[in-house]
Amino acid sequence: MLALRPAFADHLRMNLRGFHRFGVPARAAALAAALAGAGCRSLPPAASTSPDAAGREWDWGPFASRLTDARGVVRTRAAGPIFERARDPATGRTLTAARPLYARAEDPVSGWTHWDSVWPLAEGKSFKNQMSWRVATVWYQDFDTSDSRSRWRLWALPFYFQGRDAQGRAYAAVFPLGGRIREFFLLDRVDFALWPLWVQSRQGEIRSNTVLWPIFSETKGKGIYRARVFPLYGRSAMRDHYVKKFVLWPIFTSARYEYPQSRGYGFVLLPFYGRINLTDQDSHLVLPPFFRHTRGARQNLVLAPWPFVQIGWGEQRRFYLWPLYGRLRRPGVASEFALWPLFWRERIDRPGAILRRWKFLPFVSLETETLRRPPPGAPAVRRRYTQIWPLGSYERSGGERRWRGFELLPFRAPPPVERSWAPWWTVFERTIVGDRTDTELLWGVYRRQTRGDRFARTSIFPFFEWRGDRADPAAPARAWSLLKGFLGVETRNGETRLRVLYFLRFTVRREPTP
């Protein structure tokens, strides 16, 4: 006997909550939510390990979805690659994105927060009480947001500089008019007026004064003296270490070294000849820098001519016939190229692993990390990355594998690109984590989810959807639907139900209870 089952209030309430997440007014969402209740969830909630066991997941293809991926991350997405909200229940990490206008990633465990806005136009980050942001060439950094007297800087490169240094001293400068800048890259302080008319800098006990930069300059400090009238003459001396000079730079340069392990002299007269005569090295240069012969205690080198022919032996072994072929060996690193810059490979020996990289620019890029002593039963290759540009990439890290297509950049995308831009050209993605698999095409037009042999779901939006749930072996469930519930059949606990026109449900078969 057929029994009419029109009740769908629970589905309606669930999908109203889903639409409200994207700001759809209640009245405008009512009809769409009713359809979602009819077509989005083919199977009612049950005590199982299926992705939607909690009854909070829904899928409207590339338009809107809320699903748990193979990593266990709950993702709410809308408008293809544009809107995304993701949260990892295990770690608490979150991602919020309205691409490319805004993306924000947070890790509450480590205290890191990163955000981007039309990257690389603007970006920012914070770590515990430290915070910084950048918009174009305007850069701000606060070293302790909990302290109103903390160290901070606001620089609008190269025109404006303001801040407070680690000792609490304020500074400001307007380029090229004048002012003072503290902690300017490697310098403790820079003062200038009508640059390049006058510049003074300090680094520790070393003070430099420059007039009409870079022409007239004098530097004094503990054991250090430098002076120049560029490019006519210059002299630089460091007590008990060296004396260097130039005349008509770069035509003639000379140096005398007094290091305990290396004493002697050297000079270069461009473009004719050069000589370096030290206790641990003897070099002759002809038409420098093209021809050179060096014999040393640790290194020997022949350039004939540079950069086309380079031969070295000693601590570094080098053989270059540039651009046809070249190889370099130094402690812990071995590299090789052919038809530079098309083919290149490198091996880096680390204490616990070996890192290998291969590149055939711009099309092929490979990288592997191999453990020297893998744990019993674990694979030797801990990490692998392969890119065939622009078709796609493959990545494996631990027990996780991912295929992706396309790849717009001919190199591995940095985190800001992954947050703000990569989803735009990722039209296909397949992820495997243990026995959990996700496959997606065109941002959800096609989706396939499997969770071992317990759960499987296939969807071609909006035409067809099929599910199978065997989390409870005594009561397996399966369902299929057309046009998101226009017509569908579901079976659970020995009962088969037919769905027609989204809202009407009929029990067509019920097995007798034993």
Image: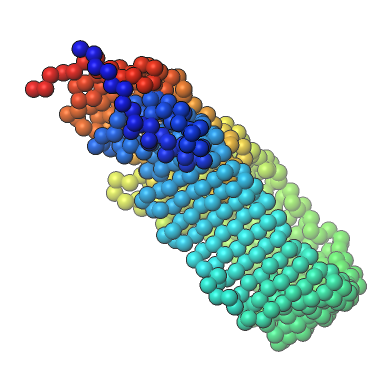
- The residue at the point 68 percent across, 59 percent down is 301
Please indicate whether residue 335 sits to the left or right of residue 169 in the image. left
- The residue at the point 62 percent across, 40 percent down is 409
Please indicate whether residue 191 sits to the left or right of residue 96 in the image. right
264 vs 54, nearest the viewer: 54
Instruction: Identify the image quadrant of the C terminus.
Output: top left
Q: Is 59 placed above or below 164 here? A: above
- Tell me if I can see residue 73 in this picture: yes
Q: Position of residue 362 (x, y in %)?
A: 64, 38
Number of numbered labels in the structure image = 0
Instruction: Identify the image quadrant of the N terminus.
Output: top left
Please indicate whether residue 445 sits to the left or right of residue 251 in the image. left
134 vs 33, nearest the viewer: 33
Q: Is 343 placed above or below 172 here? A: above
299 vs 467, nearest the viewer: 467
Q: Position of residue 421 (x, y in %)?
A: 59, 42
Q: Residue furthest left?
A: 514
Q: Is 59 placed above or below 347 here? A: above
- The residue at the point 58 percent across, 62 percent down is 315
- Tell me if I can see residue 453 in this picture: no
Q: Residue furthest front?
A: 27
Q: Position of residue 502 (x, y in %)?
A: 38, 21
Q: Which picture quadrant has residue 200?
A: bottom right
Please indicate whether residue 167 sits to the left or right of residue 499 in the image. right
- The residue at the point 54 percent across, 45 percent down is 97
Q: Is 485 placed above or below 101 here? A: above
Q: Which picture quadrant has residue 279?
A: bottom right
Q: Residue furthest bottom?
A: 222
Q: Position of residue 188 (x, y in %)?
A: 69, 78
Colour setup of the view:
rainbow
